[in-house]
Image (spheres, rainbow, N blue to C red):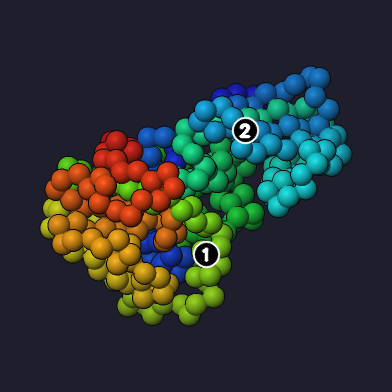
């Protein structure tokens, strides 16, 4: 573990949500916005201090532990307990006696679902030298695809070959950028809750997973908006059946000039939109919702 400044991008999972947990191929892209970690040793600090900042510099979470790893922040909440376990995993009992002062700063709001947790895991791995996937699978839930996107810093195809064996490859990704938009719904979903709910359902049949994989490859290989429109509709219908959730288009009275596909945990984070013209103002407004061109958010070069 060395003092320093580290940066990792956020992520968007464009295809394969939910089904990636059962081995379907997923497509993910890094975002232009990400998260910073500043790590330094404070000779006057007895213990370990951590704080997480929003883009405006305000603190959205903090924790402090004494030389024995006892939480002295007085919060004793689930997030504090999780951070305790992760830091103990990283450095053992001696980590509490080194005087580490750690600060993260997001370039996006944590409510946006762009990977505050996954980029954080990648940053801790950069700082500590620990295996990022060991940290993720030992302490968090999900496919690990978000971590891989943050590590790769480029569009990737990702698959779980077994529950703890990820495989991914960088790809040349040329989507129909002039047709693509992102809409933030304004109702943040908790990934851990969504993963748990999905895993309680019966595992999809192999042909369903194969269909998602084929659609992922279609997205990855095509720049034709007509092909994208068909693939988005097929993917949305399959995931709706798998999760028993309602597609975004059915809750927003969308006309046939626009095609939508939910991203990540359905119902609250981002929706990808295929439209020749700006779709801004076409959807039911949510708290803090907004619409922006896809190209402004995503790093694909």
Q: Quadrant of residue 10?
A: top left
Q: Are marks 1 and 2 in contact (CB under 8 Å)?
A: no
Look at the image and tell me whether residue 89 can be seen.
no
Q: Residue at (35%, 58%) from the top-left corner?
A: 262
48 on left or right of 165: right
Q: Quadrant of residue 193?
A: bottom right
Q: Residue at (15%, 45%) from the top-left corner?
A: 277
Which quadrant holds the C terminus?
top left
Q: How far across and how far down the image is residue 18, in percent? A: 43, 65
Q: Nearer the viewer, residue 292 or 34?
A: 292
214 on left or right of 165: left
* Residue located farthest toward the top when viewing the structure as drawn: 43
Q: Nearer the viewer, residue 246 or 81?
A: 246
Is disc 1 surrounded by few (<14), some (14 to 19) or many (20+) residues within 10 Å? some
253 on left or right of 121: left
Question: Marks 1/2: CA distance?
Answer: 28 Å
Tag shown at residue 195: 1
198 on left or right of 285: right
Q: How far across and how far down the image is residue 156, in percent? A: 35, 49
Which residue matches tag 2? 59
Look at the image and tell me whether residue 112 can be seen.
yes
Q: Residue at (84%, 42%) from the top-left corner?
A: 70
């Amino acid at each position: 573990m060395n003092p320093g400044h580290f940066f990792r991008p956020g992520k968007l999972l464009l295809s394969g949500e939910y089904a990636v947990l059962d081995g379907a191929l997923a497509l993910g892209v890094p975002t232009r916005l990400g998260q910073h970690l500043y790590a330094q040793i404070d000779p006057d600090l007895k213990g370990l201090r951590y704080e997480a900042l929003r883009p405006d510099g305000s603190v959205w979470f903090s924790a402090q532990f004494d030389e024995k790893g006892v939480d002295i922040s007085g919060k004793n909440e689930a997030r504090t307990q999780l951070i305790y376990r992760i830091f103990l995993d990283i450095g053992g009992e001696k980590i509490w006696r080194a005087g580490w002062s750690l600060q993260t700063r997001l370039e996006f709001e944590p409510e946006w679902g762009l990977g505050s947790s996954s980029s954080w895991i990648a940053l801790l791995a950069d700082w500590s030298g620990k295996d990022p996937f060991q940290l993720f699978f030992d302490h968090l839930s999900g496919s690990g695809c978000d971590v891989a996107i943050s590590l790769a810093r480029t569009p990737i195809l990702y698959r779980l070959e077994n529950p703890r064996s990820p495989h991914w490859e960088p790809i040349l990704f040329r989507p129909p950028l002039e047709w693509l938009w992102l809409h933030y719904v304004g109702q943040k979903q908790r990934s851990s809750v969504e993963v748990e709910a999905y895993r309680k359902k019966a595992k999809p049949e192999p042909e369903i997973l194969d269909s998602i994989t084929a659609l992922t490859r279609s997205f990855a290989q095509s720049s034709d908006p007509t092909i994208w429109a068909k693939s988005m509709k097929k993917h949305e219908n399959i995931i709706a059946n798998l999760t028993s959730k309602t597609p975004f288009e059915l809750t927003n009275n969308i006309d046939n000039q626009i095609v939508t596909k939910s991203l990540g945990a359905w119902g609250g984070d981002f929706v990808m939109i295929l439209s020749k013209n700006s779709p801004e103002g076409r959807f039911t407004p949510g708290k803090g919702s907004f619409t922006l061109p896809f190209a402004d958010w995503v790093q694909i070069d």
